[in-house]
Image (cartoon, grey):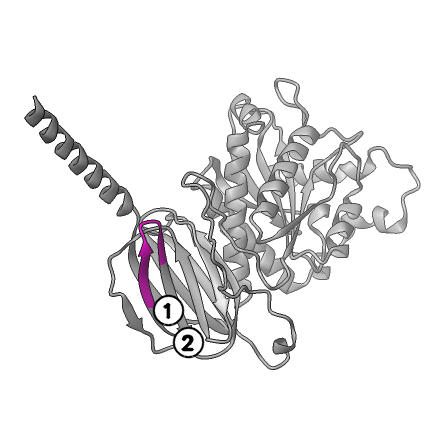
Amino acid sequence: MDRFLINFRNLLVLVIFLISGLAEASNSVEGVRSGLYKSGTRFVIDFKQKINYKILYNKSSNEIKIIFPSINWKLPDKRVFSRGSIISYEFTKINSDRSDLLLRINNEVSISRSFILPPIDYKYFRLVIDLSTINSKEKNFKSVEKSYNENHLIFPKKNSPIPLFKPMLRSKPVIVIDPGHGGVDGGAIGLNGSLEKDITLSAALYLKKIINNSGRYKVILTRTTDKYLKLRQRINIARKNNAKLFISIHADSIKNSGIRGASVYTLSERASDKEAEKLAKRENKSDLIGVEPNLDKEDSDVAQILISLVQRETMNHSLKFASIFINKLKRKEKVLGRPNRKAGFVVLKASDVPSILIEMGFMSNKADERKLQTKKFKSKLALAMLESFDKFFEEVDN
């Protein structure tokens, strides 16, 4: 019996050791690369799984320390780079709960941003760190990076959500999201009686929360309550806030209840099809609801604004973002067969703000009407927007 207990205890110790070893090696580094990117240096690490991390910058020693929970480092512990601000890295396993990666740099930099990319179009999760070279003028500003004179480091719990982005040193791009309709203008009515104005507001409030919490962008809503706004007022909110993008969200209703799926509209003098033209006419009539008959000249002429007033660059950026967004969304949600559409929406006629209108789905379809009110759909929409913002601003900033 004693022999059995000894053997059992030894077996138990072995099992615990094997389990802890597997847990420790559950996340591994599959690749590291560094190179020139825009006006700075981009550093990328490939991980098998999601990773929590902390970045500390010591300017006096020209070192950046990246702190991780314990990871399986499959690569050489040291490596030298030939291009960019990063000279080399050195990996050190501190203890069973912590690993450090030390980056040595050759000049003063700012950590302009860092974020995790999910493996949507790639095999691994990627930690991306962008370093910008600081010029003489920028050196006069007080640094916001931390030195690593810190003795206590607290990592988030294993299952806690991982922030996709660290706070940026530069100002966050402003995105204005416009919940369509509101107040006396209820918009489309669903088969089960839901109103478009309520669905768009609920979605917009959720999008604002998720996108702002990412730390990458600042979302401003044209309305946060059941309020009527003229189309020009919505545009002016974007302009006053120096918005980099204007997104108007809607939910359409048509006679054919079998049609469902999302679509994205950009401004054009000529509609892409008859349905797009009809939709634009319906939406543009919103300015005639709940307002006094004595419209000012700007409002009475708004339907005749020529496409030539819209700057070519703004139009191109609108088309670019629409294309990026629909490609991201269709990987997560059902979209129409021809999701990229064009029509003469008044709300898209800001000459200096790239603008799109999203029809999230059809209130005339039972499945879409239910889906539009779910947190699951709103989460997918938020993720598609975040991914699209990242790609769009990366491309237009080049």
Q: Residues within 10 Å of mark 1 (few under 14, many from 20)?
A: many
| Left or right for 339, reference 286 | left
Give the CA separation, mark 1 to mark 2.
8 Å
- Would residue 22 be counted in the magenta stretch? no
Q: Nearer the viewer, residue 58 or 249?
A: 58
Residue at the spot of label 2 = 84
Q: Mark 2: which secondary structure?
A: loop
What residue is at 55 percent from the left and 28 percent from the top?
374
Q: Nearer the viewer, residue 257 or 100?
A: 100
Residue at the spot of label 1 = 34
Q: Is the magenta stretch mostly helix, strand or loop?
A: strand
Q: Is residue 30 above or below residue 43?
A: above
Amino acid type of the residue tagged 2 in the rendering: Gly
Q: Which of 313 and 269 is in front in this view?
A: 313
Q: Residues within 10 Å of mark 2 (few under 14, many from 20)?
A: many
User: Dividing the picture into quarters, in which one does residue 295 lie?
Assistant: top right
Q: Nearer the viewer, residue 43 or 119?
A: 43
Residue at the outermost bottom position: 136
Q: Mark 1: which secondary structure?
A: strand
Residue at the outermost front position: 2
What residue is at 48 percent from the left and 79 percent from the top?
107
| Left or right for 190, reference 291 | left
Give x and y (percent) for residue 212: 61, 47
